Every structure is written in structure tokens, then in C-alpha cells.
Amino acid sequence: MSYSQSVESPLGPIALHSNGTALTHLDIGGKVATPQPDTITQTAAEQLAEYFDGQRTHFDLPLEPEGTAFQESIWSALQAIPYGDSLSYGELGLRAGRPGAARAVGAAVGANPLPIVIPCHRVLASDRKITGYSGGDGITTKKKLLALEGISYR
């Protein structure tokens, strides 16, 4: 069974999806037509509100993003980037045991089904520039998330 609900945020609506045991997908800018929340989506909504209020720096939710083994290794490495910090795609690749795979790392980061919770916004180019963002309004959304966490970029 799947569960879902929408929440309002400074980024606009966010749709949360659960399989009943873990959060599986988060869509910035998405709305759920017929909400059917569960404890997972409700807890995620509460934690997101705390994050946007500056009171939460780490999410404590069961997560089950679906992807390839490579993508999942990158998403796991993303979760180790602390609040207020950032890495380059190359550095993230090194941490994930994939040196020299910056482009593949970038593709995996862009495929993240749980943005914000799995903090893909904390990855910048090696020169600290924003190269893109697949969630919400793209680069505008990423800039808002970086500003919220006090992360500088060029």
C-alpha cells in the first residue's frame, strides 16, 4: 500500500510518499490530489517544518529510495554531508569510493528521489558554483536551501 500527503513549505508545496514502512519519494512543487497520510508522511511533514524553521539539522526517518546500486551508494554518501557544509561532485565521488566519476556522481545526485531529506543541495561544482538542481524550481530552489543552511556558493 502507498500513502501520501502534501505539505506547504517556503519552497511551495511538497508531496511526500511512503510505502507504509519508509519514505520513498519527495516531490518539491508536487501536490497530492487525494491525500492518504500515514505516520511516516506525518513525521516527515513535522521534520520538514522543523528544518524550514531552522530547528532541525538532521532528518530521522526510515528511508527507502529506489535506484541502482551506484545511485544508492551516492545517496548514502550524501546523507553524511553535515548541515551547513558542502562537497564538490568529485569529493562526493571519493567519499563514495568512486574517484574520477564526477559526471556519474552528478547524474546520481540528480536522480535523488528524496531531495532535502537526502541533501543533494549540498553538492556544488569544484569552483563552488551551482551547476543545476532537479527539484522544485531548479537552481532557485537550491539557492534557497543553501541560504537556509548558510552555505556559500558562487
Image (cartoon, rainbow, N blue to C red):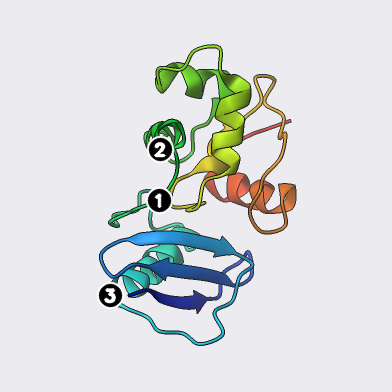
Pick whichever of labels 2 and 3 is earlier in the sequence: 3
SS type, badge 3: helix
**Residue 11 found in image quarter:** bottom right
SS type, badge 1: loop
Q: State the separation of the CA atoms marked 2 and 1.
A: 8 Å
Q: Is residue 68 left or right of residue 15?
A: left
Q: Amino acid at mark 1?
A: Pro
- Residue at point 37% right, 80% down? 37
Q: Amino acid at mark 3?
A: Thr
Q: Which one is nearer the viewer's eye here, 152 or 61?
A: 61
The answer to whether any part of residue 52 appears in the image is yes
- Residue at point 49% right, 12% down? 99
Q: Residues within 10 Å of mark 1 (few under 14, many from 20)?
A: some
Q: Which one is nearer the viewer's eye here, 151 or 33?
A: 33
Q: Residues within 10 Å of mark 2 (few under 14, many from 20)?
A: some
Q: Which one is nearer the viewer's eye here, 99 or 124?
A: 99
Mark in front: 3 vs 1: 1
x, y percent for residue 131: 72, 34
x, y percent for residue 109: 55, 38
Labels 2 & 1 near each other (Cβ < 8 A): yes
Q: State the separation of the CA atoms marked 2 and 3.
A: 24 Å
- The residue that disc 3 covers is 39
Q: State the separation of the CA atoms marked 3 and 1.
A: 18 Å
- Residue at point 56% right, 44% down? 111
Q: Is residue 75 positioned above or below 22 on the image?
A: above
x, y percent for residue 154: 74, 30
- The residue that disc 2 covers is 72
Point out the image quarter for the N terminus. bottom left
The answer to whether any part of residue 150 appears in the image is no
x, y percent for residue 103: 63, 24
Q: Amino acid at mark 2?
A: Glu
- The residue that disc 1 covers is 65
